[in-house]
Image (spheres, coloured by chain):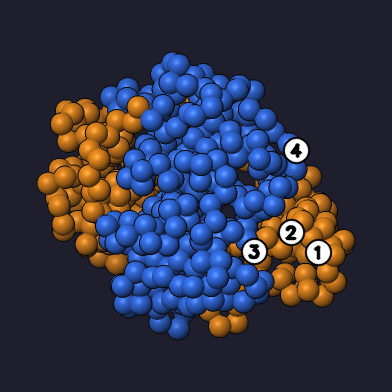
Chain colours: A blue, B orange
Amino acid sequence: MNTRTEAVMGTLVSIRVVGSGEEVDFAVERAFDWFQEIEERCSRFDPDSELMQLCGQPGKPVVASSILYEAVGFALTVAEETGGAFDPTVGYRMERRGFNKEHRSGETVRSAHVAADGASYRDVELDPRRQTITLHRPLTLDLGAVAKGLAVDAAVRELKPFRDFSIDAGGDLYLGGRNAAGELWSVGIRHPRRDNELIDTLRVSNQAVCTSGDYQKRSPDGGHHILDPRAGTSANSVASATVVAPIAMLADALATAIFVMGPKDGLRLLAEMEVEGLVITPELERFETRGLRRAA
Amino acid sequence: MAQRGSNKKVANGLVALGSAAVMAVYAAGYTRTRSAADGFNRSEGQAAERRPGIPPPARTASPAEEFIPERAANPAPALQPNLSASAKLAPAKKEDQVAETMTAPAMAAVSSAAAPVVEAKVEPPAAAPAAPNPIAPPWKDGTWEGWGSCRHGDIQAAVVIENGRIKSATIAQCLTRYSCDIIDELLPQVAKKQSPNVDNVSGATQSADAFYYAVYDALLKAK
């Protein structure tokens, strides 16, 4: 068993591979490199990131790297599929509510440009032929959930040949194959109200598990960090939303979306997408998809 | 305006789409991993380029096929004409083909059925505008301290770097409203197994956030 932990993307990332050897070490090295690279391109907190450079040039098509292009493209698709419950253009409003600390330096950052109020994902256009992104209004894209998920998924590609491994990006997980005991991986779902307690345990294999909770990252005004893009205030009918999906990028984005949509609409969406999930309300009521407990 | 026209929910389309996007990103590769790949090549005494997977010892017959789950591939293949091709192309053996096909933006290939599929497209040279230091300097050895805060108070972390890697991260000072004992209990959760009963825990704690930030702060100084 080989475990390595590094601080990247505003959290600690741990990669565990069942097995060892030089090939494992190099694969883990490359997996971490993906986190670094994707953070550098997609960070909202770094004015020099490719993402923020793009945000500084509204109105004109900007050629994007594959990482940025695919991340934005996927985020827009999820935005459309969720009717805007997930919207990567909430960046500027997030800043104004105080989520503007650079994770590494603690410095407060501000977008140099002013976002047009009412901007939404519909103001972003992709040109697949030229691989360009055009922002039709001044806005700040927030790829937080999608970028972290994409990094996990890219890391999965590096580790897949070893079959049995786990990636933990600050509570966003991907579990490949089986654990060291040869069993399905067990994943605890953090209790949204009690620190250090689990509210549930799932058994999974070859799946990503992402949980959005209102216990993470409170803003100074007491609201939590998931914004309902349709209203501008924090969503509040869900305390914790967990999505189990084959792709971390999707699990992460949908966890954010159903947090905003509420338990009923959220679960209906998951059923349509054929992914599994668990929603806990502030009253600790549970809602889950039918296939959640089915062994992976 | 977003490109995708259909308002219909594409059942499982997002899984397929996400897979394709990850494949496109992965296949395009990037400069940074060269450092690791070079290390690998040096030790192997060969000079292969890092691209769709330097094939490590394959323990599974076709790792890439596993990546796209069966149920994503089966229903509604008509929606994603290129996806099944993508999935099959993935094994690293057909490296040329992979590189050619995969660098075309997956979003285009998968989502706009009506639009003509893009020609094999090489990463535009202008695509790397913001990569000031492609190879990150390793952290300097030593013990580095940093501060982080949450609404419970401030935490100072001490990070020990050995041979350019994080050897350990501990709490140096704990100025929170709760006793350090409570925080201490969090510590093993941060880097290691997060609960005695499970392999992993999904969802982060805000208490741990302050510690994360403190570790960041410390690592900045180690650069």
What residue lies at 71% left-to-right and 71% top-to-bottom?
B186
Q: Residue furthest left?
A: B78
Task: First in sequence, mark 1 or 3: give its number.
Answer: 1
Location of the N terminus of chain B by quadrant is top left
Could you tell me which chain the residue with mark 4 belongs to?
A
Location of the C terminus of chain B by quadrant is top right
Which kind of residue does numbered mark 3 sit on?
Thr
Q: Secondary structure at mark 3?
A: loop
Same chain check for tags 2 and 4: no
What residue lies at 69% left-to-right and 41% top-to-bottom?
A98
Same chain check for tags 3 and 2: yes
- Look at discs 1 and 3 and give the one toward the viewer: 3
Q: CA distance from mark 2 to mark 1?
A: 8 Å
**Would you identify the image quadrant in which residue A194 lies?**
bottom right
Could you tell me which chain the residue with mark 1 belongs to?
B
What residue lies at 39% left-to-right and 70% top-to-bottom?
A288
CB under 8 Å between discs 4 and 1: no
CB under 8 Å between discs 2 and 4: no
- Label for residue A107? 4
- Circle 4 Cα neighbour tier, 10 Å, few/some/many (<14 / 14–19 / ≥20): few
Could you tell me which chain the residue with mark 3 belongs to?
B
Q: Secondary structure at mark 2?
A: helix
Residue B65, compared with residue A65, is above or below; it is: below
Same chain check for tags 2 and 1: yes
